[in-house]
Image (spheres, helix red, strand yellow):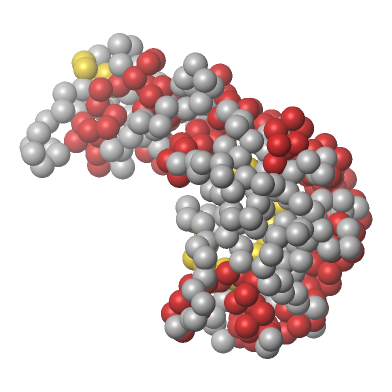
Amino acid sequence: MNPLDTLIELSSQMTLEHAEDVRTRGRDAPDCYSPRERDQAFVHPAQLPNGKSIKLLKTLLSSACERDCFYCPFRAGRDFRRATFKPDEFANLFSKMNQSGFAQGVFLSSGLAGGGVRTQDKLLDAADILRKKHQFKGYIHLKIMPGAEKDQVYRAMQLADRVSINLEAPNTERLARLAPHKTFIEELLRPLRWVEEIRRAVPAHQFWNGKYPSTVTQFVAGGADESDLELLTTTHWLTKNLRLKRAYFSAFHPIRDTPLENKPAVTPLREHRLYQASFLIRDYGFEVEDLPFASDENLPLQSDPKLAWAQLNLIHAPIEVNRADRRELMRVPGIGQRGAEAILAARRIRKLRDLSSLKKLGVIAERAAPYLLLDGRKAAVQPALFGG
């Protein structure tokens, strides 16, 4: 198999891995590729932490794996063709792709073969060759393998813009249902702790581009019958204590020839609600206990969590736009971070008395109206303002 075919094979096999900053999962690749199908199989549009959009190659160094995680398409013993790159083979191929403009960044993971330390060394070698031999200065997201050592985590942080390890489940009990031979604290959570310890101990200038790499993780939502409350409680703790940049949620869908192949798929809408809730916690000042969980400790699927919270808390107690602080404003549906800042700036000059003024500030006025007072008066939706 030539290097490009190996890359196509590995990338198209990543059916469970979540595309970076993209809300869709990979699909089973066709047996025969047109050029367009081949390109779409393993290059994804992605948004970097700085907001810049790039074409991201998302692939594995190897799909061979010695672990037998119940949900995973790469689990040991599953009957499918495996493929493997040597670190220098991968680095050489990606460098050519980068120079041709085909891919601007890389997300590199791997199946676990020969232990976490050995597999991590191969990932580090590939990244090191890219940085040193090929002088690649673009974006690298590098996976941390279960069982990796602290020095390897440190080296990954020196080479990559982002590092991650997938927790997959929110706690030890739930992980046992998904991956009985992984240990939640020692193998998965501890490397995330190490990243934060290293950040606190080592100056930023010693890392790639003089910056600390960001950290992310992923959960298989619904794979272990966990609740949204469990997932978001763990996410909040990681964000607060380990400076996790964000959590990815991948709605469980069964993979043929795995122990969970007959488990019903989880609706992608649940994944969407988890993202919305996690952003409320990270960016909008919400606490986990503020979120509108149902009696089963899950978020309502029929409404986004911010709107559901406002219906419970603001519909009969609307806030005064001219007095509310930033945190209060951001809890109103239709008002985001920029909208709240714009309101605070505008009302230093004048009182805000109508919805048209809010619309000019970037507020989705018709969405915010039921939860606001404008100079002491309930905001009135004007049909002409909203075109109907």
Q: Is residue 162 above or below residue 103?
A: above
Residues 194 and 198: in front is 194
Residue at the image position 72 percent from the left and 56 percent from the top: 75
* Quadrant hosting residue 325: top left
**Is 121 or 14 nearer to us in this picture?**
14
In this rendering, is residue 271 above or below 84? Answer: above
Question: Along the horizontal axis of the image, is 236 left or right of 335?
Answer: right
Quadrant (top left, top right, bottom left, bottom right) of the N terminus? bottom right
Residue at point 76%, 83% (across, down): 89
Residue 11: quarter of image: bottom right
Q: Along the horizontal axis of the image, is 110 left or right of 301?
A: right
The x, y position of residue 201, in whole percent, is: 87, 45
Q: Nearer the viewer, residue 166 or 54?
A: 166
> What residue appears at the point 24 percent right and 39 percent down from the top-left corner?
359
Q: Nearer the viewer, residue 195 or 67?
A: 67
Report x, y in % for residue 255. Answer: 59, 53
Residue 186 occupies which quadrant of the picture? Answer: top right
Q: Is residue 134 visible?
A: no
Question: Which residue is at the far top?
Answer: 316
Please determine whether, in this image, residue 151 is positioned above or below residue 233: below
Q: At 48% from the left edge and 81% from the top edge, which residue is drawn?
A: 33
